[in-house]
Image (tube, rainbow, N blue to C red):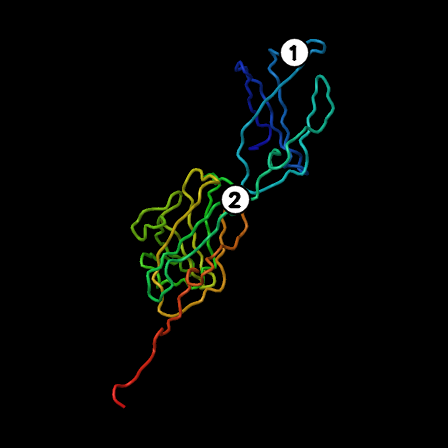
């Protein structure tokens, strides 16, 4: 609904236009608009009692809102001229109920690393899949937070920008397996924004660039870091969310093997440590 009293046009099979009038609900029910269909006067004689049955089917296309919702009231219908009292229409049940908007959730949300050795090049890989289609109209943005252990010194392809005393960095992300070759991930921007107010509040932001991402698509990307020299144990899983579609934060799945958990750096020890002498 754009404004009060918007006029819409519906055509029949022969292309004859019938106009309709959208009306926003009263202030106490502004989210309950009504649609009045005004048949073309040229076919008005169809509605005279005793002549023909008046049967009409029409449809209209709209953009769903970005936030999930479940309608509270059933749609009702009435007629004037030939008065028909208001009654509830038959509706499909959710999710086919008109204006029922699905709650977006991750079907897949996985993060892993390639190497947990000190000072090693380490590819952090992310895989995400959602239960709803993503559309550019909603401007979806992937946000990963809780990337504890991630430090500025670990990036090799980082550009730093300071905004309002917070450090914000741009880093290159690539398709899985591409390393730092520059091959952009499908459906995503090749540059991510990383902020590190603290290690505990380390956040990575990636824009979805595709016009549409279907539910069958797994969004994958990776970024490369150089591990530090000291051991680090990542105790908690990062959190993922796609902003712009009414999604809530979701804890990501990490591999069961500790050394494959992102940003964990192994504690190094000697496998063999012995000494002796040749002549007593």
The relative height of residue 183 versus residue 28 in the rendered view (above or below) is below
Residue at the limit of the structure toward the top, as seen here: 51
Q: Which structural element holds mark 1?
A: helix
Task: Please provide percent x and percent y for residue 132.
Answer: 51, 41
Is 21 displayed left or right of 157 in the figure? right
Residue at the limit of the structure toward the front, as seen here: 279
Is 13 displayed left or right of 276 in the figure? right
Of the two numbered discs 2 and 1 on the same chain, state the one appearing first in sequence: 1
Return the residue at label 2: 245
Return the residue at label 1: 46
Q: Residue at x 67, y 37 (%)?
A: 29
* Count of marks, rendered view: 2
The crowding category of the residue bearing disc 1, from other C-alpha atoms within 10 Å (few below 14, some 14 to 19, many at least 20), is: some
Q: Quadrant of residue 1?
A: top right
Q: Quadrant of residue 195?
A: bottom left
The crowding category of the residue bearing disc 2, from other C-alpha atoms within 10 Å (few below 14, some 14 to 19, many at least 20), is: many
Q: CA distance from mark 2 to mark 1?
A: 45 Å
State the quadrant of the C terminus.
bottom left
The relative height of residue 231 versus residue 56 in the rendered view (above or below) is below
Task: Please provide percent x and percent y for residue 110.
Answer: 46, 53
Task: Please provide percent x and percent y for residue 209.
Answer: 40, 42
Q: Which structural element holds mark 2?
A: loop
| Viewer-proximal residue among 48 and 146 | 146
Q: Residue at x 58, y 18 (%)?
A: 18
């Amino acid at each position: 609904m754009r404004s009060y009293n918007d006029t819409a046009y519906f055509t029949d099979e022969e292309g004859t236009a019938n106009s309709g009038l959208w009306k926003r609900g009263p202030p106490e029910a502004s989210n309950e608009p009504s649609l009045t269909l005004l048949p073309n006067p040229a076919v008005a004689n169809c509605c005279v009692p005793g002549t023909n049955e008046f049967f009409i089917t029409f449809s209209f296309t709209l953009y769903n809102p970005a936030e999930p919702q479940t309608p509270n009231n059933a749609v009702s219908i009435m007629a004037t001229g030939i008065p028909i009292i208001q009654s509830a229409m038959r509706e499909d049940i959710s999710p086919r109920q008109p204006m029922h908007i699905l709650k977006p959730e991750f079907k897949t949300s996985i993060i892993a690393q390639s190497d947990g050795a000190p000072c090693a090049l380490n590819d952090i890989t992310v895989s995400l899949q959602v239960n709803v289609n993503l559309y550019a109209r909603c401007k979806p943005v992937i946000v990963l937070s809780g990337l504890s252990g991630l430090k500025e010194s670990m990036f090799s392809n980082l550009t730093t920008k300071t905004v309002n005393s917070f450090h914000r960095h741009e880093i290159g992300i690539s398709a899985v397996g591409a390393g730092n070759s520059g091959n952009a991930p499908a459906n995503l921007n090749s540059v991510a924004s990383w902020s590190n107010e603290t290690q505990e509040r380390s956040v990575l932001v990636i824009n979805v660039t595709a016009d549409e991402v279907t539910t069958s698509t797994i969004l994958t990307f990776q970024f490369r870091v150089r591990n530090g020299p000291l051991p680090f144990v990542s105790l908690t899983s990062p959190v993922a969310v796609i902003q712009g579609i009414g999604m809530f934060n979701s804890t990501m799945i990490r591999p069961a093997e500790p050394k494959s958990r992102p940003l964990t750096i192994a504690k190094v020890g000697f496998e063999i440590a012995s000494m002796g002498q040749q002549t007593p």
